[in-house]
Image (cartoon, coloured by chain):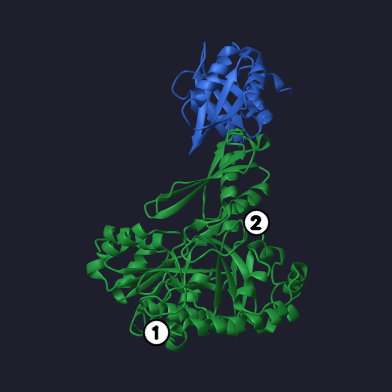
Amino acid sequence: MIAWDPNMELMPEAELKRMQFKLLKTLVYRLYSFSNFYHDRMVAHGVHPDDINRLEDVVKLPYMVKSDLRDNYPDKIFTAEPEELVRYHVSSGTTGKPTVVGYTKNDLDNWTESLARALTSCGVGRGDVVQVAYGYGLFTGGLGLHYGAERIGASVVPASVGNTERQLELILDLRVTAICCTPSYLMHIGETAKKMGISIKDDTRLKTAILGAEPWSDQMRDRIEEEMGIKAYNIYGTSELSGPMFTECTEQDGFHMWSDLALVEIIDRDTGQPVPDGEQGEMVVTILQKEALPIIRYRTGDITSIDHSLCACGRTHPRIARLAGRVDDMLIIRGINVFPSQVEHTLLSIPEVSGHFMIEVNRVGALDNMLVKVELNPEAFSDKINDILDIRRKVGHTLKNMLNVSVDVEISEPGSLPRFEGKAKRVIDRRVL
Amino acid sequence: MDTTQYTIKQISVFSENKPGRLAAIAGALQAEKINILAFSIAEANGFGVVRALVDKPEAAYEKLNAMGFMVSFTDVIAVKMRDVPGGLFEMASILSEAEINIEYSYAYSGREAAVLILRVDRVDAAVEQILARGGTLLSADEFS
């Protein structure tokens, strides 16, 4: 087993926990003193840094949720001075306002270090040619993996997403050995290769895929590994935590959650009580060393379980299982998080349609397709087809701008879409993973 | 000049493109004993607009609206065409020379002659030009 940072990755569990406690205590003191947001939260919650006397005391601290970031848009929770910030990433919020994440130099360094360890644990390193086919830009996937792969000395091909034939050309010509993208996009690349008469297995040097940013399954992994003759590893992270940070190791038995960076709790979503190893609950994460946007007890909304036992690879850092779902109604469309509340918010800003809608998600070939059905407002009805097509285009454009993902729009008759009395079920997800 | 007598109220109905929608519209009109004199469907991907000239447009509007359909009135004109080669050309030329744009049109075979229903951008100008050039317009009365 090759580790990027053996001292850290193989550190005995007891030592790791001592280190985590020190980091937690430091973090809590710092935020109590220097962050208005966390100070007020702790006071309101009746907890003082002096109450944190062992690692388990983390449960005394208040949670942070995604809407806290929206409510404090864009940077009210930041604790670094503006000139200390070296990067911003932006992701979609639950409604109108996006979530802004800022990074200091140290934040980027920790994030990159996390991925350097992760990529090494997947057997990627110097001599590998890594094609990063996650989106570059405001999304964390592209740049995150780019710098992680550079740090371990791999050759990076910053392909970003799209132009699949070009991606294949690069894979062939630059002798790419590892690719980072969403699992559905890799399937799409596989299908395109087939059409072009290219066998990923026989004609390319691809041997590793780092796949994430959307839900997938072990069945899908088996299919990818068998058809393409590669090893496929799962990667996890969200922009609030920094971006993608954790992957499985070559054992493919859970994501190693680097303990010096992340303190992971799995809680019963209703009672808030911690659940034992192996039992499913909502993952709550504290990022121990973040400077710009500190994250204490962030409710990720992801359902998984944790395993603290020593991994067969030798790493001592605990592992979380493949995500089993979400506690909320968040959808992931082609790697982009979409909340039905965002769709509702957007539609309410368009006078030509009503706020009633339905979302249908399908997988067409390997790619996700999202259809939003809306009702035309009678006042907007015109006998001219082009007027209605213009409204459909407008709805499509506005949704794309808000969601960062293109959607199909279907115009329905008023009153034809379902009405809900209790909790609305506006999503029909027909994807089979 | 007063062009209102030549302005005919067409009903336009929004319909999703799925089985049974036209039957629902036609059935409702039948139930109200409303006769359809001319009719067309414009379709796009997933939806369409049913346009019809009926003998009782107000009653048709009320009925379809009550059933939850989106209905609107649109002013159109109906021109008699000579049922010979060049009949459509005559009418189209008159409008073209006056730079009046046809938004859409449909035709039906009337009792005495072929009839062209026109939705134009300037109704009054179209009526004046057609009459001035010797064309024959059907009046709204002839549809009730």
Q: Quadrant of residue B116?
A: top right
Residue type at numbered disc 2: Thr
A352 and B95: which is toward the camera: A352
**Are the residues tagged 1 and 2 within 8 Å (C-beta)?**
no
Q: Is residue B54 above or below residue A98?
A: above
Q: Which residue is mark 2?
A: A95
Left or right: where A200 falls relative to A328: left
Dot 1 alpha-carbon crowd within 10 angstroms: few under 14, some 14 to 19, many 20 or more: many
In depth, the one of A326 and A177 nearer the eye is A326
Instruction: Determine the image quadrant of residue B67.
Output: top right
Residue at 45% across, 81% down: A116
Q: Is residue A220 left or right of residue A258?
A: left
Q: Could you tell me residue A153's position as x and y percent?
A: 40, 86
Mark 1 sits on what residue? A3
Query: Is residue B35 among the parts visible in the rendering?
Result: no
Amino acid type, label 1 = Ala
Report the chain shown in green: A
Q: Given the current orientation, which residue lies at the most extreme left position?
A: A202
The percent position of residue B40, horizontal first and vertical second, equals: 51, 25
Image quadrant for the C terminus of chain A? bottom left
- The x and y percentages for residue A13 are 48, 81
